[in-house]
Each structure stands twice: as C-alpha cells, then as structure tokens.
Image (cartoon, rainbow, N blue to C red):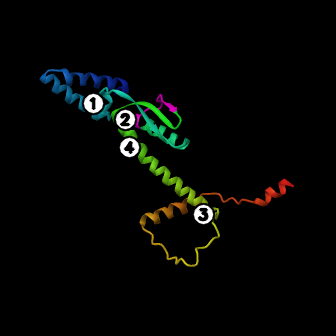
Amino acid sequence: MTTQVSPERLIDKLRKLEELVTRGVDGERDKARILRDAIAEKYGISLDTIIEQPTAQCEFKFGNPNEKKLLIHCLLWVCQTHMIPNLTKGKRLICWLTETQKIDLTDCYAHYLKAYRQGVDDFTAAFIHKHNLFSEVKDAPNKTSQPKRTNAQDEDRLRRIRNLMTFMDKTKWDNRKKLTESK
C-alpha cells in the first residue's frame, strides 16, 4: 500500500534538504543533495520552486481587454496557480514576481501575443473575404499589374484564412431594411 504525499509536504521536505545542502557538513551535505535531487526528479518538482526568491513589483502593458485576458492567462500559467493578486491601472497589469517568473512571463506573453495578433489579422481577412467587402475601384490604367509571387508563409496564411471562412456564417447587410423602418 502506497501513501500519497501532498505537494506541500514534498516541498517542505525539499526545503529542509536544501537547508542541509547549503549549511550541512561534508558527508551530510552530499547525502542531502543526492536525496533532494532524487525526490525532485521522482515527483517532477523544479528546484526553483523550493528556493525562496525575492519578488519585486512588475508592470506589464496590454492593448485591449482580450490582450489583458491573454496576459492574465500567461501569468497564471507561468506561476502555476489559479489565483494571483494583481492590480490593473489603465492598460497596465501590476503584480509581484520573482526575476525568473518575470523573464518567463515576458517571453511567454510576447510569444502568444504575436500569435494572437496574427490570428486576429487572419480572422479579419477571412471575415472581409467571406462577406465580399471589397471596393469596386480598379487599378489606374497606367499601372501594370503583375501577379504577385507567394511564398510558403503566404500560402499557409491563405490556407488558414480559407479554413476560417468555412466556419463563418455569412450575413448580408441590407441597407433597404433601414429605409423601410424609417418610413
């Protein structure tokens, strides 16, 4: 029969072993290091979580409510928690993080923000194409238009846009409806 050890007890034990590693004497120090590393590896616990790191106030900027939501989810993921006390002032999120968490959050948010913005651009292009919202103006007669060559990235983007379009409902704007309602 195996007993389940709570994560809090494991971390507490690892912290005590870390104390022996840093303050112990020769053989005691070596045995504590071996045991600490074995427990951490067995339970998949990063040694960063057991070493108390100082926290500092950090500020992150976002552009709109969806980017704020993305930033908060990145923050929750980086800190591996469900609740983080934070404060928003305008378009800034203020929280307390370790230096490692700050670096990870900065990198994580930049990565997903770039992907999010590309997705929004693709969605907008798909929406415009799905609803045929194009100008009827043709190129000026003195300009010669040649087909533009596409690369692999352009082809991937076109594929993503086509896929997005297939799942969109097509709605038609009817300006006659407003004319009849106003009479």
* Residue 59 in view of the camera: yes
Q: What kind of residue is marked 3?
A: His
Distance from Cα at disc 3 to Cα at disc 2? 41 Å
Q: What kind of residue is marked 4?
A: Asp
Q: Earlier in the sequence, mark 2 or mark 4?
A: 2
Instruction: From the viewer's side, name the closer residue of 37 and 42.
Output: 37
Quarter of the picture containing the N terminus is top left
Q: Tell me which segment is drawn in magenta.
A: 78-88
Query: What number is the disc on residue 39?
Result: 1
Q: Earlier in the sequence, mark 3 or mark 4?
A: 4
Q: Which of marks 4 and 1 is in front?
A: 4
Dominant secondary structure (helix, strand or loop) of the stretch shown in magenta = loop
Image quarter for residue 65?
top right
Image quarter for residue 18?
top left
Horizontal arrangement in the rendering, residue 23 relative to residue 50 (left or right): left
Give the x, y percent position of residue 57.
Answer: 40, 29
- Categorize mark 4 by other alpha carbons within 10 Å: few (<14), some (14-19), many (20+): few
Residue drawn at 45 percent across, 72 percent down: 149
Distance from Cα at disc 2 to Cα at disc 4? 10 Å
Q: Earlier in the sequence, mark 4 or mark 1?
A: 1
Distance from Cα at disc 4 to Cα at disc 1? 29 Å
SS category of the residue bearing label 1: helix
Quarter of the picture containing the C terminus is bottom right
